[in-house]
Image: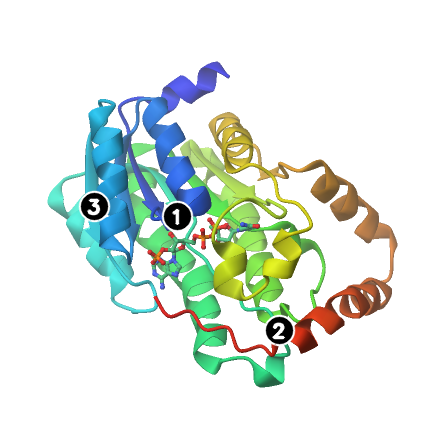
């Protein structure tokens, strides 16, 4: 655990810091002594968290940005590295899903998953990682999911974005390890946050969720140690292991059977109005 002290005094940029896992990542990084840059769309939430962290002694900046906007990563970079703030810890956490039959899902929220969960992760990493390479030091956390271990009918786009995140993080980790940079793919299972509400998938939340602080504690310990992947939940560790031995068609068939009745009931009419 002593590696957590390495975060002390470093600037950490956390995307999706206005809620859920991102807000808790910011809290626990601040508790490690890191300085925080909080970004998301809901500025009121970010300001409230900034006030809380500042009161506990942390140095905090807020950068409002909508990662649906292709220009947002560059704007975040300009407001931080470009303004002389060296970002040594990049947390690619912002993300969203949409539950329901693909042919009835809101197109904008399907495309938003690709932009926020994938494109912004690549863009932000491509902007900040070169500076970490120059400094021969840095940490990148990419929040993937247990959804990255098999296709998930009725969350088809979401699961595909998360396998992208996991493979991206794992590939990048091998590339930048020689420069002293640690990259970790965090793969939580169902976790306490606003995710299910945004995705229109509250029925799955009712089945039980892991506490956010537990997920984040394990994530930061893994990042500090430079672990490639962290599965913070026991069920995720078991299922991600078992799926290696089963035909993907069979797994997908059973996931579809389990999810279909709820997808049909949900009407796939969720929309991310933020
Ligand atoms: N909760 C789970 O069960 C679970 C499981 C596995 C993986 N994950 C992953 O964990 C990450 C965090 O999600 P969460 O569970 O904490 O959900 P959450 O409570 O809904 O938080 C999502 C965060 O992403 C931000 N965000 C969404 N769209 C954005 C946009 N267009 N631009 C900028 N920020 C945006 C939101 O901020 P604003 O709305 O203020 O912009 C919010 O801060 C996601 O990548 C998710 O896929 C979650």
- Spot the residue most to the top: 2
Question: Which picture quadrant has residue 65?
Answer: bottom left
The total of numbered circles placed on residues is: 3
Q: Earlier in the sequence, mark 3 or mark 2?
A: 3
Where is residue 175 shown, x and y percent of the image?
49, 45
- Which element is circle 1 on? loop
* Mark 1 and mark 3: Cα distance apart in space: 14 Å
Name the residue carrying label 1: 19
Residue at (82, 62) in percent of width and height: 251
232 sits to left or right of 150:
left
Badge 3 local density, few (<14 within 10 Å), some, or many (20+)? some
Residue 159, compared with residue 8, is above or below; it is below
Residue at (62, 62) in percent of width and height: 159
Where is residue 107 shown, x and y percent of the image?
48, 81
* Mark 3 and mark 2: Cα distance apart in space: 36 Å
Colour scheme of this structure image? rainbow
Name the residue carrying label 3: 62
Camera-side residue: 181 or 26?
A: 26
Q: Earlier in the sequence, mark 1 or mark 3?
A: 1
- Which element is circle 3 on? strand
Label 1 beta carbon within 8 A of ligand 1: yes
- Disc 1 vs disc 3: Cβ atoms closer than 8 Å? no
Camera-side residue: 41 or 76?
A: 41
Name the residue carrying label 2: 266
Figure quadrant, ligand 1: bottom left
């Amino acid at each position: 655990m002593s590696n957590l002290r390495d975060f002390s005094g470093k600037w950490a940029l956390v995307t999706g810091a206005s809620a859920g896992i991102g807000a808790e990542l910011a809290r626990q990084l601040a508790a490690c002594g890191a300085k925080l840059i909080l970004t998301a769309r809901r500025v009121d939430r970010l300001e409230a968290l900034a006030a809380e962290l500042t009161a506990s002694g942390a140095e905090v900046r807020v950068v409002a940005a909508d990662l649906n906007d292709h220009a947002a990563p560059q704007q975040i970079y300009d407001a931080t590295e470009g303004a002389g703030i060296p970002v040594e810890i990049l947390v690619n956490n912002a993300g969203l899903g949409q539950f329901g039959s693909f042919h009835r899902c809101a197109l904008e929220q399907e495309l938003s998953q690709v932009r926020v969960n994938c494109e912004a992760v690549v863009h932000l990493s491509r902007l900040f990682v070169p500076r970490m390479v120059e400094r021969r030091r840095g940490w990148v956390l990419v929040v993937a999911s247990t959804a990255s271990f098999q296709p998930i009918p009725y969350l088809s786009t979401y699961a595909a974005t998360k396998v992208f995140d996991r493979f991206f993080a794992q590939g990048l980790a091998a590339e930048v390890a020689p420069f002293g940079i640690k990259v970790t793919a965090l793969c939580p299972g169902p976790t306490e946050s606003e995710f299910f509400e945004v995705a229109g998938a509250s029925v799955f939340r009712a089945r039980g969720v892991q506490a956010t602080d537990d997920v984040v504690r394990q994530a930061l310990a893994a990042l500090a140690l430079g672990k490639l992947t962290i599965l913070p939940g026991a069920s995720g560790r078991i299922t991600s292991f078992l799926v290696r031995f089963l035909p993907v068609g069979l797994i997908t068939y059973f996931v579809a059977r389990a999810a279909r009745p709820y997808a049909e009931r949900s009407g796939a009419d969720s929309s991310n109005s933020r």
